[in-house]
Amino acid sequence: MKSICVIGIGYVGLPTAAMFASKGHRVVGFDVNKNAVSALNKGKIIIEEPGLGELVKEVVEKGNLTGTDECPKDCDVYIIAVPTPINKDKTADMRFVESATRSIVPCLEPGNIVVLESTSPPRTVEDLMLPILSESGLKMGEDVYVAHSPERILPGQVLYELKNNSRIVGGINEISSQKVKELYESFCEGEICLTTSTTAEMCKLMENTFRDVNIALANELAKMSEELGVNAWEVIELANKHPRVNILSPGPGVGGHCIALDPWFLVEKSKNALLINQGRHINDSMPEYVFEKIRKILGGFNGQLITLLGVTYKPNIDDVRESPIMRLLDLLKHENVVVNVCDPHANNKVGGIDSVYAASDRSSMVVLCVNHKEFEDIDFEQLRSVMDGNVILDTRNFFDKDKVESAGLRYELLGNGR
Ligand SMILES: NC(=O)c1ccc[n+]([C@@H]2O[C@H](COP(=O)([O-])OP(=O)(O)OC[C@H]3O[C@@H](n4cnc5c(N)ncnc54)[C@H](O)[C@@H]3O)[C@@H](O)[C@H]2O)c1
């Protein structure tokens, strides 16, 4: 069994730390956020993720997982899971990876393993981390084994995916890959594929870029459909009957810490990332597009109350990072309207009203922004009775049009030009 330090105990680092701890390793979660550390030491979590609270409580009580706000010296393995956000100019902000790497240097000893899990621009391990780690005086690849192993978990099913997903391990040399593979085998039952660190970085970025570009295609279809008098959702349903076609769904934009950001890392690093760049711009334009649609449906903004259902970047999670709905909210806030937000999951208190009906009281328009499961059973008769206006704008093709209309409400669907 190894002693493992996970640097950054957020959405990725904490479940990873807990999984290693559950397999008997001695794990220390190192984070600069003292609240996260003190919660961890009480066996508590400050994020929402099914099953994680129970697992953390169990491994903390067993003494296998502890938290600290200083990089511990006596570990065999250092795993970096810190944020990699983007700057205003869409370049990668690598300050966290850099400082996490620096914090390891005084702790390094021969035989140690260093793994970067954070999603990073191509060549981060080679060009940013190795020069810093080499300041220890140890030889990278000989004394210390270094690899990138990108995390591909889906929020909401993190524990299942950590165990069952395949994992890429890109070492700076073969022995690094091998050592890191053996490490993850303690909880990962999926295939562990070995490659170089830069290929691993590229793989992770291309996975998210694939999704982003394809969502951009669906969003472009939605805009064209409204222009040309067709229903994008019908086009998608019919086109996807072709055995080799799978058009994704349009929506009010792409958010989250991954898909909305990672393609920019490629745009920054390669002048050939043209389609990728365009796809990002199309997806980033969707909140404005929905905003203009709301304005058009209402015939302008003159003090109406608008209700947004959902602000998180995807359904049934608490995460609002990069959420396109936050951008939509921001646009509406600058207009002469009042906005109520109902989100039973959001962690930022923006979705302050838990009841759909309370949030829609005297509303002119209800906009379904995120298809949370709580919105599945809306009673449209009750909704109609509390609203002043009668418009439902569905940006996800989530509601049953007939049910909405039979309650006397007007149903508008993003991407429907029919
Ligand atoms: N959230 C996801 O679903 C997901 C999925 C796959 C990959 N990723 C990638 O994983 C990485 C981490 O993402 P996250 O969602 O866990 O971030 P997060 O913000 O939830 O957690 C990161 C933690 O790192 C801490 N931190 C920052 N700098 C530090 C430092 N120098 N030393 C110690 N702690 C430090 C922060 O305080 C924070 O608690 C990112 O690169 C992200 O792109 C995230």
Image: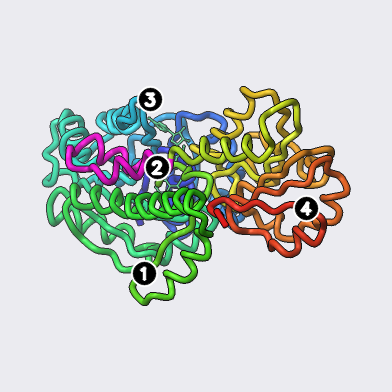
Q: CA distance from mark 3 to mark 2?
A: 18 Å
- The amino acid type, in three-letter code, at marker 1 is Val
- The amino acid type, in three-letter code, at marker 3 is Lys
| Numbered label attached to residue 245 | 1
Earlier along the polypeptide chain: callout 4 or callout 1?
Answer: 1
Q: Which residue is mark 4?
A: 409
Please tell me how crowded label 4 is: few (under 14), some (14-19), or many (20+) other residues with Cα within 10 Å: many
Q: CA distance from mark 1 to mark 2?
A: 21 Å
Residue range in magenta is 260-283
Mark 1 against mark 3, which lies toward the viewer?
A: 1
Q: CA distance from mark 4 to mark 1?
A: 35 Å
Q: Quadrant of ligand 1?
A: top left
Earlier along the polypeptide chain: callout 4 or callout 2?
Answer: 2
Q: Which residue is mark 2?
A: 282
Q: Which residue is mark 3?
A: 88
Please tell me how crowded label 3 is: few (under 14), some (14-19), or many (20+) other residues with Cα within 10 Å: few
Mark 4 against mark 1, which lies toward the viewer?
A: 4
Whether label 1 touches label 3, CB < 8 Å: no
